Structures are given as structure tokens and as C-alpha cells.
Image (cartoon, rainbow, N blue to C red):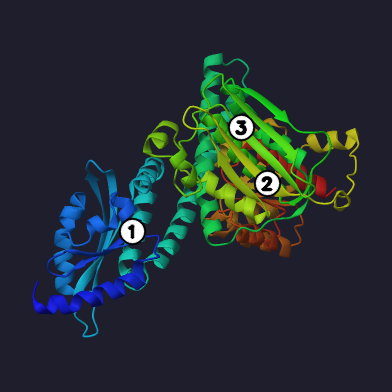
């Protein structure tokens, strides 16, 4: 090491300590010419499985052998003062999978490169997710990924983390919309076939399998979008007084098919007295469904799953979801509520999923003023998740009005409707029209704003059902033009986008209900009953 390198070394240490000590991203700094590791933050040490003191002073390719191919990047960046990034597949004793890397120069006061900053991360799960999405919509995904990569490369030197997050959010929104659209006709076709009583049990089993996997795919997309909303602080709760027992019953009903299919012993232990909460019932049901579905997934056939509800003092209730499944290793308990973490790669390969459910659950519970924690005696000994929530005083819960049986029957059996169905996706339009007509409704279809306006001008309809993304405009534009023309029919919006602002925009345009794709025929029928009942 020459005298100039010796003089510059303290500068590198000072800059790096201030920059990366607290960073959650794995980062290290190396010398500009010798590539000796001068500093590594705790996240980097955890990634490569070594103590920080064992890394310092070692050449980078010896400290991290599996990253040795990056030396040419280090040389180039140290020489030019530029920046490089990408993803590569690596196989080693430490790690087998994909690594994402970023390399950029450390510049001194004289505007000269004096070292190189290295960012490595395990991109295996992200790559696997991308490959699954490619199989569903390869052309769109490859284009979106490339746009993401181009955008990141242009702006990485200015703000790597911020730009990456923004591009990821946009990418997920676009991909989720495009993936949801083709799932709707699949669900519709399955619903139609399941109505055929002449099909053999084997075919019915196959149809249930198809439906289950389509719904699973949609749930994975929802998890990704929920995580994005949570990280951006955009989740808004519709708080109201609710009876926890009713939310539990709804969650159990939602998960009932999974429990039955796995042939599990299942029970609910809750007292008759109501537990009254100020909560968003749909989000609280989502939390319970996450834990119930996890319990079912990680419990072998013939095992036990249960949900128990008990008071913890005068102001708190505890909901426990217990199972006799595969259990959790003690060293994994502290990582369960981290994004994309499922207890290790073996668990991910065996059970699938993205590892986002517990992150979403923890955030939603905390927004309700509660906590969630995991307990397990170890692998093979089952697991228990305890959700603590604050209780409301009994007087805060309003009396409920009993709905007469006749009114319930009226809502569950809507009359024959004249429906204008606007959808440019041919498969979706054809399948939904056939299913709606099987229910006794009369359906006219249109493929864009212009044809929908022409059809509306020459016909009388009871309700509008419209996709929002149309070739010559939007469903919002169509709705506003119909309203301006004096058409006051109730309307249902269909979209692959389901953020809060998307629902708000639909409501402001005049839609009564906003449904997020994939939409099953059962959801659409319920929405039709809702909007027509609301208009008398």
C-alpha cells in the first residue's frame, strides 16, 4: 500500500461508518486499488455468515469467495468513479441462488475515487417470484422488468433505495392489474362447470383444484399490494364498533374449505358474551384468515387447529390460533414477522408462499392498537399465535336491528335485471355474460366507451357493470357521460387496481361498488343484489 492509500484510508472509514452503520442493506467498503475490506456493516456480515472482525483487512475475493467474480466491477468503478449494478446467479457452500449487487465509487474532497462501496443482497426469492409471474404473462412481465431495470440504472447514483421502492410499487401495481384480468374468466368458467351435476367426482375435484389455485394466485398478488401499502403508510382503517365473535365466525367460514380438505380437527373456544372492539371488520377478518390459513398449511392431515378467545383483564382480549403442525425452531421466532421470511429456504420450498402474511398481520394488528406474537416449543411441536386487542366499553356498541326473514329473502334473490356489461377482454365478457344469463338476467355487452354509449342510448337498463380500462377511454369517463345524459342506473366498477384511491375515484365518478379482479360470479351476483336493493 503506497503513502497516498495510507492517507486516504481514514477518510474511507469515516465516510462509511456514517453512511452504512445503521443501514438495513448489506454494504461494505473496499480499497480502490487493493480491494481490501475496510468496513462492513452488520447486515453485510449477516448476509455472508461471518463476523465483521474476520472480514476487515482481507481481500474482498477471500472475505466473500462466492462474490469473487465482482472484482472486475470493483476495478472498473475504482478507475472511472462510476457505478454498476445487476443480478447474478451464484452457487457456493454458503449460498445457492441469485445475488443482487450494486457497486459505486467513494469520492474524496478532491473529487477522486479513493475506494469502492459494495451492496450485496440475496435476490433468490425475488427472482423466483419474477419467474412465476413470467409463466403467467411473460411478454408484459419482461417489458416491465426491463423498464424497472432501466429506471433504476438511470437514477441509482442519486438515491438507490428511494428509486428502487418507487419503481417496485409501480411495477407491482401494473403487473397485478394485468395478472388479475385473465383470472376472472378462469373463475367464471370454473363456476359454470361446477353447476353441471353430471360431471364425475374426479372432474369436480379437478375444478375445485383449479379454483383453489386461481384464488391462491390472486391472494399472493393481494399480499404484495398490501405490503406496498403498509410500507408507504397508505392503509386506512374503516373503524366501527364490531363484535369480535362475528369476525371470528366470518374468518372460520372463509377458511372452512381448507380445513375440511386437510381433514383437520378444528374447534372454536369462545364465551357467549360479546367482545366489543373498535375495528375495521374486513381488515380484522383478514388478520384472522392469515393466521388460520397458516395454521392449516403447516399442519399435516389429521392434525388439530383451533381458535380460542378470552378476556385479558377488563380492557383487553386475546385471540389465540393454535395448531399441532410442524412448529417453529427457536432461532426462527424472532424473524417470523420480517418480509419474505418463512423460516428458511427449506420451508419455502416445501410450503410455498411469499412470506408476507405475518408482516401484513402485524401491521394491521398494531394499527388496531394491539400486538401479535408467536410461540412454539420447537420443530414438530406446533405453534401458537396470540393477538391482543383493546376492548370497547359495552355501551359503545350500538344495538343491531333485526332484519325480517322476508327482507333477507328479497336481498338473496334479486329479480331479473337488464344489465349493460362493458368489457374489452373477450374471454371475460363471454363467460360472465353466459353465467349472468344462466341466473336469469338479460345482458348486453359493449367493448369500449363509444359502443357502450350507443347501446345505452337505444336501450333501457337496470344496472351498469363496467371495466375501468377501456380501449378508447376509461370506465370513469363512461360513467360521467352517462350521468350527464340523465342515466341514473346503479353501477359496478371492475378493475385490477384496488388501492384506496382507486376505490375513491370510482365512487366520485358515480359507481356504487368497486370490485377488484379476479371477480367471481358469486361476488358479482352479491354486488348486483346490493346495488339494486339500495335503489329500491
Asked if 346 appears above or below 19 in the picture, the reply is: above
Secondary structure under the numbered disc 3 in the rendered image: strand
- The residue under the point 14% across, 61% down is 72
Q: Which mark is residue 322?
A: 3
Q: Earlier in the sequence, mark 1 or mark 3?
A: 1
Res 423 seen here: no
Q: Position of residue 187 (x, y in %)?
A: 56, 35
Secondary structure under the numbered disc 2 in the rendered image: strand
Q: Position of residue 183 (x, y in %)?
A: 51, 40
- The residue under the point 45% across, 41% down is 332
Depth order, front residue of 486/184: 184
Res 130 seen here: yes
Q: Earlier in the sequence, mark 1 or mark 2?
A: 1
Depth order, front residue of 144/400: 400
State yes or no: discs 1 and 3 in contact (Cβ < 8 Å): no
Secondary structure under the numbered disc 1 in the rendered image: loop
Q: Position of residue 284 (x, y in %)?
A: 67, 46
Q: CA distance from mark 3 to mark 2?
A: 15 Å
Q: Quadrant of residue 310?
A: top right
Q: Which mark is residue 26?
A: 1
Q: Position of residue 466 (x, y in %)?
A: 63, 50
What residue would you read off at disc 2?
388
Amino acid at each position: 500500500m503506497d503513502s497516498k492509500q495510507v492517507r486516504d484510508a481514514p477518510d474511507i472509514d469515516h465516510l462509511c461508518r456514517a453512511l452504512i452503520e445503521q443501514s438495513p442493506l448489506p454494504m461494505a467498503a473496499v480499497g480502490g486499488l487493493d480491494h481490501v475490506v475496510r468496513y462492513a456493516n452488520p447486515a453485510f456480515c449477516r448476509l455472508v455468515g461471518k463476523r465483521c472482525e474476520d472480514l476487515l483487512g482481507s481481500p474482498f475475493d477471500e472475505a466473500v469467495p462466492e462474490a469473487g467474480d465482482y472484482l472486475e466491477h470493483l476495478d472498473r468503478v475504482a478507475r472511472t468513479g462510476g457505478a454498476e449494478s445487476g443480478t447474478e446467479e451464484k452457487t457456493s457452500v454458503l449460498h445457492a441462488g441469485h445475488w443482487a449487487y450494486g457497486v459505486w465509487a467513494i469520492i474524496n474532497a478532491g473529487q477522486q475515487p479513493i475506494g469502492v462501496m459494495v451492496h450485496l443482497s440475496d435476490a433468490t426469492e425475488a427472482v423466483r417470484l419474477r419467474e412465476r409471474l413470467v409463466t403467467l404473462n411473460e411478454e408484459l412481465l419482461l417489458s416491465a422488468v426491463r423498464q424497472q431495470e432501466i429506471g433504476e440504472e438511470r437514477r441509482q447514483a442519486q438515491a438507490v433505495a428511494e428509486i428502487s421502492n418507487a419503481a417496485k410499487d409501480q411495477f407491482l401495481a401494473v403487473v397485478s392489474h394485468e395478472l388479475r384480468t385473465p383470472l376472472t374468466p378462469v373463475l367464471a368458467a370454473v363456476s359454470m362447470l361446477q353447476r353441471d351435476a353430471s360431471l364425475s367426482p374426479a372432474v369436480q375435484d379437478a375444478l375445485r383444484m383449479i379454483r383453489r389455485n386461481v384464488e391462491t394466485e390472486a391472494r399472493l398478488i393481494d399480499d404484495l399490494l398490501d405490503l406496498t401499502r403498509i410500507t408507504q403508510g397508505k392503509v386506512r382503517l374503516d373503524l366501527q364498533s364490531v363484535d369480535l365473535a362475528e369476525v371470528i365466525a366470518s374468518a372460520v367460514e372463509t377458511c372452512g374449505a381448507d380445513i375440511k380438505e386437510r381433514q383437520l380437527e378444528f374447534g372454536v373456544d369462545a364465551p357467549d358474551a360479546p367482545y366489543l372492539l373498535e375495528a375495521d371488520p374486513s381488515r380484522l377478518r383478514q388478520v384472522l384468515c392469515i393466521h388460520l390459513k397458516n395454521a392449516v398449511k403447516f399442519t399435516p392431515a389429521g392434525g388439530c387447529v383451533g381458535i380460542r378467545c378470552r378476556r385479558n383483564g377488563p380492557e383487553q382480549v386475546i385471540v389465540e390460533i393454535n395448531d399441532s403442525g410442524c412448529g417453529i425452531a427457536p432461532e426462527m421466532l424472532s424473524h417470523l414477522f420480517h418480509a419474505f421470511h418463512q423460516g428458511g429456504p427449506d420451508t419455502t420450498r416445501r410450503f410455498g408462499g411469499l412470506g408476507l402474511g405475518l408482516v401484513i398481520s402485524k401491521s394491521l394488528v398494531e394499527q388496531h392498537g394491539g400486538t401479535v406474537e408467536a410461540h412454539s416449543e420447537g420443530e414438530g411441536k406446533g405453534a401458537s399465535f396470540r393477538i391482543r386487542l383493546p376492548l370497547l366499553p359495552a355501551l359503545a356498541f350500538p344495538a343491531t336491528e333485526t332484519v325480517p326473514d322476508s327482507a333477507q329473502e328479497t336481498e338473496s334473490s334479486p329479480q331479473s335485471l337488464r344489465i349493460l356489461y362493458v368489457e374489452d377482454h373477450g374471454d371475460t365478457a363471454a363467460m360472465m355474460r353466459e353465467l349472468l344469463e344462466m341466473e336469469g338476467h338479460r345482458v348486453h355487452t359493449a367493448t369500449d366507451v363509444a359502443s357502450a354509449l350507443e347501446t345505452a342510448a337505444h336501450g333501457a337498463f337496470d344496472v351498469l357493470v363496467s371495466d375501468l380500462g377501456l380501449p378508447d377511454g376509461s370506465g370513469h369517463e363512461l360513467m360521467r357521460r352517462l350521468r350527464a345524459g340523465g342515466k341514473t342506473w346503479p353501477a359496478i366498477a371492475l378493475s385490477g387496481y384496488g388501492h384506496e384511491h382507486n376505490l375513491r375515484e370510482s365512487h366520485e365518478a358515480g359507481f356504487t361498488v368497486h370490485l377488484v379482479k379476479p371477480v367471481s360470479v358469486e361476488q358479482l351476483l352479491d354486488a348486483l343484489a346490493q346495488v339494486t336493493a339500495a335503489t329500491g
